[in-house]
Every structure is written in C-alpha cells, then in structure tokens.
Image: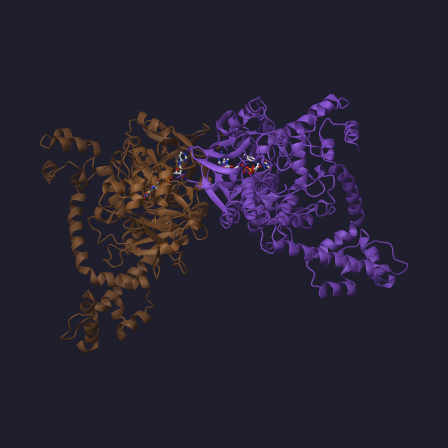
Chain colours: A brown, B purple
C-alpha cells in the first residue's frame, strides 16, 4: 500500500501564491487535488513585501476574485491598510492596494485551503516528475514516494536551485532560512526544456521600535477604504494602521557606493537579470545617478508586530554597508536589523514553452505557474496558478480549455505576453502592457469574468447573481439618466459652482452627468436622483459603475470597437501542426520564431517579436483570407 | 560600522522554548539582549505535540510562571483545551495540561517577545562562538558577522548536525522542512567539550477530515477548566475543543512489524538513545510484546485547522508501513497523511559539563539550555532557558547566581539531576524524580518561587502582591478553621453521609476538615464557613490552598523536616578547587566522578552516581564536620 492509493486528478507542487490558487481552483471545480509543499507551516508566505495589489496588480487581484480565486478574500481579511491608487486619474488607472498582516495572510490562506473540498495536503520536497510517453503521470518526492496524478502544476517560485547573495557571500536557499529545491530543473532539461536564471532581491527587515517616525511622513490609508472581493464575504476595513515615508540622500548614496566593489550585482557574481521595475537601491543610484534621493516606504508587517519592511531599499550589498547607509536615512538613525536584505538567483523556464493554458508544449498534462515562468509578484503568480489549476482540471475532465484574451483581462495580457514574447527579465504587470485598459478596469472584473468562470464551474452561482444584480442596477441607473430630463433652473447653480457652462434648455440628465466637472455627488443633489437611489437601495459599487458607464461611454465604445477588430484576427486559428517551413515568403526570423512559439491564432502570431505586418499578410493569403 | 555596534549583555542563540524564555528573562531583568535565530517566522515552534504541561511538566510550567517567565501566559492564551491530570490523587500529583493552537502559540510568543524591552532580534544561523581566554565574548554568524556579547546562551534544540530518519532514508535537517545547524559542535569539541548523540521522534500528522471520530472515544476538557498563570493576565477557557482516543490492535502491530527490518531503530542505523518514556510505537510493541493494544490520542492542532497530531504513534518506520498500519486503527480507515512521522538524531552536550547556573565549566559566560543538554520536552527546555537567562544577566551584572534547590522546585530537581548525574538518554521530568513532591505542588509554585524571583529582579511587584494576598488569605482561612469550633449536632449528619464516624463532642473545624472524607464543598455547608468566605471574597485558588494546607498538613510538615535535614548537607560547601586526589580513603570511582562533576555542596556530592555514604563520611571528616 502506498501513502497515496489514488491517482489524483491534479497534483500541485509548491504552496506559494501560484500553488495555492491552483490547488483551490482545481479542487473547487471538482478535481481530486493534492497540494505538495516543502513546509506546510509556510503556506502562502509573502516572501517579500507585505502587500497585495497596486498598479495593474490590484486589477489582477480583482480579476482573480471575479474568477472565484481566493487571493482577494484573503487579502481583504488580513489587510491593515487600504488605498485606491491613482484615484485622481481615470477609472482605467484606479488600482486597489492593501498592506497585509504577513502572519495572518498565511494563516488565512491555510485555513481556507483546509476548508476546500477535494483538496489533500502533503509536506515534502518534490524531486522529480513521473512522465510516460510525454505525458505526466505523477511526481516523486525526496523520500522516493511516488504520487500518481493525471496532471501536475509546478509552482516552485524562487526555490529551484536558489542561490542567495549578500555582498561577497553566497549560499543555497529557496528563501532566507529555507532550503532550495533540487532535481526538478535537471530532469526538465533532460526532457528537452530550456531553463534560465533570474534574480530578485529584498530589503532588510528592521525593528520598528528603533525608528523615529516623527522624522518621517505619515501615510495613512484611504478615508473610505474599499476592498478587493466582489463577494459579500468580506467588508472594508474600519480601522487601519498607517505607513510612513522617508528618503535616501546623497550621503546615503555615497555610503552605499562604498560597497559597490563588493556588490554581487556589480562585480559579476550575479549574472542573471533582476526585475527592472523593482530595482535594488544600488541599481537605482547607479542608473539614476542624477537623482539625489529615492523614496522609502516604511511598511509595518502586521497589526501587532514591530517588524518593518523597508520598501524601496532592496539590496544585496554587504550587510554592513546596508546598515551604515540605512542609519543615515531620516528616522533610521538608530535602526536595528531583524535581517539584512539579500538577492536570490533561481531557475526559471522561458514561458514560450507553454500554451495559453499554461500547459507545457513538451509534456502533456504538465503546467507551470508563477515565478517559475519568469514573472515576479504575488499577483502575477496567483493569477497564473488559478489559470493553470482551472485548465488542469478541465483537461483531465476532457473539457474545453479556459483562456482569457487580451481584451478580457490583465490575466489574458499577462499569459499572452509570456507565451508569445517570453521574457528575459522578471516580468511584472503594468497598465501600459494592456492595449484595452479602459475595458480592463478594477471595477468591472466581475462583469468581464464571473460569467465565464461560472460557466466552466468555478465562480459560484452566488457570485454570478451578485454580479448580475450589480450590472442590472447600474444599467438601469444609466437608463434612468438617459431618459430623465432636467431643467436649466434645476441645474445651473451647480454647473456654475463646478465651473461648467450653464444649460440653455431642458436636457437629459445623462448629458449633464457626462460633463467632466460633474460628479455623482452633484447628481445626488437632484431630488429625482436621490429618490431613485433610495428607492432601489443602490450601493456604492452600483453608483460607481453607473458613473463610469456614463462618463467614459465614449472611450469604452471606442476600445470595444478596436478590440472587436482584433477579435477578427483572433478568430483565425492556425492549425496545430502548421508547417511554417513551407511558407518561403515569410522572413527567416518570422519562420524561426513562429515555428518555436507556435501561435494558435493570427492575432497571437502578430505579437510574436520579429514577426512583421507583411509576414502576417503572407499568412493570411496562404490561409485563404 | 558593524551591524551590531554594541556589546550585548546577553546573546541567546535559538528561539525555541529555551531560547525564548532565556531572552525574555535576561531582557526583563534589564540586560541588553539579542535573540539570534535561524528563522524569525518559526519562533517558539512546537516541534512535536501541540500541548503544554502534563504530569510533572505542568508543575514546571507553573514554576516558570511563578518566576516571571512567559510559558504559562502564552499557554493559557493559546489553549484549546484544559485538563488537570491526576485530580483523583493527592494534590502533589495534580498536573495541569493544555492542548494548544500551534500557530497561535508561536504567534503569541513572538508578539510577547517583541513587546519586551531591551530585546533585539536577528535572523541568521550562528556558526561559532567568539572566545577569548576561556571567556565567551560573542558569536559569529554564517555570513561571518561578529556580534559581541558579555555572555551567550546556546539553545540549539535538535538542530546541531540534525539527521532525519524515515525508514531506510536519512537526510540532514533540524526539523522536517528546516535545515540543520553546523559548526558549533565542532568548535565546542575543540574547546574540550564532550558531545554525544541522541534521538527523538514524532508521529505522522494527518488530515482530520479523513477520520471517523464516531469510532473513537471523545476526550473533552475539564468541566471547570483552570489555567497555568498565577497572574490576572489570563483567564480560564470558556470554550474548548475535544480530543479523541483510539487504540492500536494486534493487526496494527503485525502491520508495523512488517517494516521492522527497514527500521533505522532496529537495523542499527540509529545508534543513539531516544526518550524512554516517549517511545516510538515500534519500540512499544517490541518492548511490551504482550500488550495487544496501545492508546492513541487524537489531538487537534488548533481551533480551526483540520491538522491532527496522532499522539502515541511516534515512528521512524518507512512511511508506507506507517500509513498501512495507521489505516487499520479504528477511525483511521481512510486516513490521509499531511506528513509521515520521523526520527531525528542530533548532538547534545552531556550536562555534567555545567554548573548549577547552567554556565559551562569550561568557558566562562557560556550557558547551555534545553535539548542541547540532553533533555526532551518544551517545559524542560523552557525552564532551563529561564534559569540560564537569569543567570547570564546576574553574572554580567556581578550579582549572585540564582539557583533552585531540590526542595524548592522541579526546576531545581531537573538541573541538579542533569549536572550531577548527567543523562545518557533524553531526560524528561517525572514526579518520581522529586524527593519532596508534596512540597513541589502545582498550586504553590507562586509561594515557593515568586518571592525569590522578585528579589533578584524578574518576577514583578504585582506578582508578589498577588501571591502574598493569596497566601495571607489562605493562612487566615486555615487559622479560622483552627480557631472555630463546631458542635456534633451541626456536623454529624454530613459525617454520616460521607461515611465518616460521628463526633462525640465539640471540636475545632480543622479537625473535621482534616478527615479524608470531608471536602471543601462539605465545609461550605456550615453557615460560619460560608459567611467567612463571602465576607473575605475568597476565590477558588485561596480555598484550594487552604484545603491542601489543612488536609496535607502532616505530610507537608514531615517533608519539610526531611528537606531541612538535607539543607544541612546543602549548607556544607565544597571549595571550588577542592583536590579529591588527596583523599586517598575515597573509593577510586568516587574520586574520579567527584573530580569530574565537582559538586558544590556535600549534598550534591552525595547524589553523584558511584559516591557512597561512606565516601560522604570521609569528606565530612576531612572538612572537619
Ligand atoms: C527574496 C525575494 C525577493 C522578492 N522580491 C520581489 C519584489 O521585489 N517584487 C515582487 O513583485 N516580487 C518579489 N518577489 C517575488 C514574489 O515573492 C514571488 O513572485 C511570488 O511569491 C511567487 O509566487 P510563487 O507561488 O510562484 O512562488 P513562491 O511564493 O516562491 O512559492 C513557492 C512554493 O513552492 C514550494 N516549493 C518549491 N519547490 C518545491 C518542491 N520541489 N517541492 C515542494 N514544494 C516546493 C515552496 O516551499 C513554496 O511554498 C521576491 C521573492 C523573494 C524570495
Ligand atoms: C521530531 C521531534 C520530535 C520530538 N518529540 C518529542 C517528544 O516525543 N516528547 C517531548 O517531550 N519532546 C519531543 N521533542 C522535543 C521538543 O520539541 C524539544 O524538547 C523542545 O522543543 C526543545 O526546545 P529547545 O528550545 O531546546 O529547542 P528547539 O525547540 O528545537 O529550538 C531550537 C531553536 O534554535 C534555533 N537554532 C538552532 N541552531 C541554531 C543556530 N546555529 N543559529 C541560530 N538558531 C539556531 C532553531 O531555529 C530553533 O528556533 C521532539 C522534537 C522533535 C524535533
């Protein structure tokens, strides 16, 4: 009798953000699922900053939630501060972000997974895959235990041959204080996979009791905090813990420079690329030599703990240099370290080896999600995990794959970018990566995604009903504005006050509301509007939806039209075994890249780097379009 | 500038139960203290069973609390179930025990330590000691950082060259999923220390959702739960989670025996000794071959988690054997493993190399506490940590050492046993190890220890006041019983009911109460008693104290007299550099052992194994007594 009698539908390796979402999704859809991880006490550990969301990442968390993942709910329940970033810009830019209680975040995840049906747990290191005829059939552990599975999702994060650097010292490890995972990379190379190395870094953790916050700028949360989850299961914070801000200075930079000759980044010891947009502090002062200061965000690690995360001071300089320099920052004169910052190098697998489902092209039933695909960030990892978990379940149950397009979700953009373009440096999401960001807003992820997820069996009926009610109510409210007229004498005072030109004759409310100077608060001053809201008990999110639909109607319509154009190319499928070598009129580069990436649609082909519009024309002609 | 500018008074290495108490004690007494540990996320991790206290161990937790340590408070705050064991026996045997929420236990410890003044934290592996002229002056870390300290407390637990065994497999580790610590043993050997190997084991953790509790016997907590801490900071539980019990069977034993040839315990791969009184299940069926079943306690790991600890099934048999056998236990037919049981071998240092203060004899200012001294158990570890932390503080501040005698505390017995007799197998506390267990009760640890700890600056004024009030109230109540008479007609009905012979003439209440059949509940039926209790608002603990003082007056007085006799020998100090080689009339063995152990008093000398009463006479004569 083996420890595992059954063949699992889905085995998820690793319980970071990717692994947790993958396991939850597969299990919730009905797959018998096993989550194997090196240490069950470190489930959903936040390896770096204690925060979820932020620009573009907040949108992803909302999308995960709309699809029925857990990250939004867990983040809401364990938040110590909420901020809607970019609130002064248009709604396409609004990005929710929370500070999290690191311990509670991990605990909440663990308890939630324990409460998930069909999901088993096992603590051990996975050291290899069981593959038969290019099909994955399970995993082997370091104890030599074989676990059979119809599909496997690998989410090893930074652990694969992880190597930690601080100054001139280096040692193996998956994270500070945890061991690296070995064996998997080597086996995948044997199967014919390509792997690469990347690096990422983290700042020192310090003792909040040693800081002088009076010398810093306080950063409170939003006055009216919102939340991530569309479900009723969570509520906005009623109490928040503030963060603080301080700055580096020329003096700090000089002190850091003293360690440059011992920096693994600059002396060549670290060869791999780190996240361009989360650079280390040494990188920042090097690349932006003219800037004489950089912001540091001083973030508490939880409600009660005195541990502080020094956001912006990621570094792998020698620990004495880190310390000396940080002591010169205002408020940090007497700082004490809990642990120094460090950099870590790890193996990743260029994601062009994946399909849109995140299944590998080489081994059937094998999925990769998270940092192993060359991404960085919890949100990026979690969303890939969710998609991989869903698709593993669907494949095992012979159902259609579930993929998202670039005009449907940031998650669609993320995965399409990864598998089509690959990435040489840790990939993080930005709003600028999305062509249709007016469509992909944080406020409408439920409308975009809940119906699709519900259809394949993940998002619950309840979520669908909640979403539909919200949509209907906001659509009705928009209609009300479209159909209800208003007289100049009713509105001109307000218009004047807001600096908007007066009306000359009666017009629809929609028209008034469309004016950029007029906000919902102004509209509410009209008795008819107030009465309508009251009568229908409309909540904040419905009003906001309606406001966005009114004010951005034009932009939204335009982007939709563009997206529909794209859709036409998206609908032109390229056969699985399309033979590019026959298309002599393709450029050499295009032929090579296309043969490697094997895009599934003409639209995806057009995004492969090195493929020109004329190459696309050649293909269209060849395919008889 | 180094990461640590200052010389710390006390550096504590390791944040297990020993390290946490050591750090808290030293810091609370006013020493600038640094707690260095491999992973700040695993502070006060319960490596094995999620429980504190139990027979003799519960008494230790009460003593730690009375001295001003944290283990009692943390245990109270994170308990999910309370039981006073042995309640049917005399009060010397009463032993409090709680089931703990493992995650909350660790979290509560961490937050408490963060709230402790003078205490800094640092995450890294300590790889060596800094020693100058046989005096410790600090530690070095794996990054090569030197931290200066006037004293160092080593509490490495099972981590020193830890080697994990499961069946025929073995791999390095300090605990499952954590890495071993290296370097320290090797260096201590160079300094002239002796080291040895011990082993301990742990059972599998399983998924509570896979168990059928209806086939087990429920084990609820006490109806009226008490608590560990004498302070007002905690309250008894108002809600408890039950445990369950099941049994192994001949079938289970047969299945386990199938793995014996692959057992590291039986095939000679593990050579070191394990805890005799926490034997593995294979040990039990081997040693007690005639017993056809063994109890298994099925203990939840917390309030909300489904993880279950299978107490009594500790094993290092191959994981498939563990699994197959456990599946044959009633209620475990469909059990799923979170992780298999395993054994771990680790280095310890025979504790005869220590003084009563837990300072090493070889290196001044260096203290050892916990599993490193060959003990097993959280409580044993915590109490040593507390004593080592106190003494490190006192030494650094040129104050008298703080030690406890065998008639003062189980902690005194523990340390005296360790340093006088040493131990070849993991040492755990039993009531039978204490000569004066009627004095060393769980109910009076505050009276015994709080005044002494307060005097040296650890136990707070508040604790002292609370204790004194309790003592005064119970003494007064005893006096009241001694002075208040009662008439036969008042009491004879009750006596008859309780099966106690009737009184013939008026007598003091004390006399009545002394009778074994009469309990406080009976006494309360007398109006005068009820009125007294009411008038003085006496609480449960005061009444219990008075009852014990009345009922056990005789035993207590007798043990006190015995203890005082011992005290006479205890007062005869042996000079530090006493030259045993000169005492030719000592037996050879005594001369050798005494020269090695170097007892500080004649009383301690008498406990050294191989030292006979006639050897003691020789010494007394020589010393002119
Ligand atoms: C030092 C450091 C700095 C970082 N800095 C940043 C930053 O600046 N910005 C940013 O956005 N992100 C940063 N990150 C990245 C962020 O933490 C990750 O992107 C995110 O956690 C990835 O999630 P994941 O699920 O892919 O992997 P992880 O969160 O790393 O989880 C991997 C999980 O897999 C388990 N595991 C690994 N191998 C095995 C195996 N063989 N068998 C069983 N279990 C296994 C591990 O125990 C772990 O539970 C940093 C990470 C680290 C470690
Ligand atoms: C597998 C297993 C089974 C056990 N079974 C039983 C049992 O059946 N019954 C029983 O009573 N007890 C059992 N125990 C023992 C119980 O867990 C210990 O007695 C108790 O935890 C010892 O406490 P400690 O503080 O001495 O060490 P630990 O709790 O082991 O803590 C040691 C600490 O030191 C840190 N550390 C170690 N080396 C270094 C270093 N070089 N640098 C920095 N930090 C370091 C570690 O990270 C850890 O925080 C078991 C323990 C294990 C691991």
In the displayed structure, B404 sits above or below B170; it is below
The residue sitting at the right extreme is B504
Would residue A131 be seen by someone viewing this image from the given angle?
Answer: yes
Residue nearer the viewer, A507 or B432: B432
Report which quarter residue A532 is drawn in.
bottom left
Q: Position of residue B575 (x, y in %)?
A: 70, 32
Residue B154: percent from the left, percent from the top? 54, 35
Quadrant for ligand 1? top left
Residue A369, picture quadrant = top left
Residue at the image position 67 percent from the left and 40 percent from the top:
B412
Residue A623: which quarter of the image?
Answer: top left
Residue A348 seen in the figure = no
Q: Quadrant of the C terminus of chain A?
A: top left
Name the spot of residue A505 as percent of width and height, x first: 14, 75
Viewer-proximal residue among B408 and A30: B408
x and y percent of residue A88 in the render?
25, 59
Left of B595 or right of it: where is A215? left
Relative to residue B104, is residue B367 depicted above or below?
Answer: above
């Amino acid at each position: 009798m083996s420890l595992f009698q059954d063949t699992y539908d889905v085995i998820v390796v690793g319980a970071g953000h990717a692994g947790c979402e993958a396991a939850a999704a597969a299990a919730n859809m009905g797959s018998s699922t096993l989550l194997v991880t090196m240490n069950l006490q470190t489930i959903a550990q936040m390896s770096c900053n204690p925060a979820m969301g932020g620009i573009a990442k907040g949108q992803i968390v909302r999308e995960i939630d709309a699809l029925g993942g857990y990250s939004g709910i867990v983040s809401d329940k364990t938040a110590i501060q909420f901020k809607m970033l970019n609130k002064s810009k248009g709604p396409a830019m609004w990005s929710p972000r929370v500070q999290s209680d690191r311990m509670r975040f991990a605990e909440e995840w663990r308890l939630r997974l324990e409460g998930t049906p069909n999901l088993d747990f096992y603590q051990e290191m996975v050291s290899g895959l069981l593959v038969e005829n290019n099909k994955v059939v399970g995993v082997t552990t370091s104890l030599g235990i074989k676990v059979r599975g119809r599909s496997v999702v690998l989410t090893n994060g930074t652990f694969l041959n992880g190597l930690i650097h601080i100054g001139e010292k280096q040692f193996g490890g998956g994270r500070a204080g945890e061991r690296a995972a070995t064996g998997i990379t080597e086996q995948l190379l044997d199967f014919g996979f390509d792997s690469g190395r990347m690096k990422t870094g983290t700042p020192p953790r310090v003792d909040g009791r040693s800081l002088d916050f009076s010398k810093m700028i306080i950063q409170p949360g939003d006055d009216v905090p919102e939340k991530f989850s569309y479900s009723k299961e969570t509520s906005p914070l009623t109490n928040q813990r503030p963060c603080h801000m301080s700055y580096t200075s020329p003096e700090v930079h000089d002190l850091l420079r003293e360690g440059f000759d011992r920096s693994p980044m600059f002396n060549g010891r670290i060869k791999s690329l780190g996240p361009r947009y989360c650079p280390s502090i040494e990188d920042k002062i090097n690349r932006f030599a003219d800037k004489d200061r950089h912001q540091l965000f001083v973030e508490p690690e939880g409600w009660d703990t005195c541990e502080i995360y020094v956001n912006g001071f990621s570094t792998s300089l020698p620990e004495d240099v880190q310390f000396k320099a940080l002591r010169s920052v205002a408020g940090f004169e007497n700082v004490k370290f809990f642990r120094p910052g460090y950099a870590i190098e790890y193996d990743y697998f260029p994601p062009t080896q994946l399909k849109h489902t995140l299944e590998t092209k080489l081994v059937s039933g094998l999925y990769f999600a998270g940092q192993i695909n060359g991404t960085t960030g919890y949100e990026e990892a979690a969303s890939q995990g969710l998609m991989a978990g869903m698709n593993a379940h669907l494949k095992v149950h012979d159902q259609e794959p579930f993929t998202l397009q670039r005009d449907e979700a940031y998650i669609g953009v993320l995965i399409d970018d990864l598998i089509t373009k690959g990435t040489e440096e840790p990939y993080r999401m930005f709003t600028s990566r999305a062509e249709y960001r007016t469509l992909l807003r944080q406020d409408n992820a439920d409308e975009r995604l809940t119906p699709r997820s519900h259809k394949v069996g993940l998002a619950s009926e309840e979520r669908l009903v909640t979403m539909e009610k919200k949509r209907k109510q906001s659509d009705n409210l928009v209609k009300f504005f479209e159909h209800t007229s208003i007289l100049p004498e009713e509105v001109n005072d307000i218009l004047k006050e807001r600096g908007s030109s007066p009306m000359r004759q009666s017009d629809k409310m929609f028209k008034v509301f469309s004016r950029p100077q007029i906000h919902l608060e102004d509209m509410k001053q009209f008795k008819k509007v107030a009465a309508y809201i009251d009568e229908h008990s409309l909540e904040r999110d419905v009003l906001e939806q309606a406001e966005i639909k009114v004010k951005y109607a034009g932009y939204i319509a335009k982007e939709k039209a563009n997206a529909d154009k794209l859709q036409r190319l998206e609908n032109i499928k390229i056969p699985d075994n399309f033979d590019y070598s026959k298309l002599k009129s393709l450029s050499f580069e295009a032929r090579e890249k296309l043969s490697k990436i094997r895009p599934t649609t003409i639209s995806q082909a057009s995004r492969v780097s090195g493929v020109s519009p004329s190459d696309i024309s050649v293909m269209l002609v060849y395919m008889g379009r």
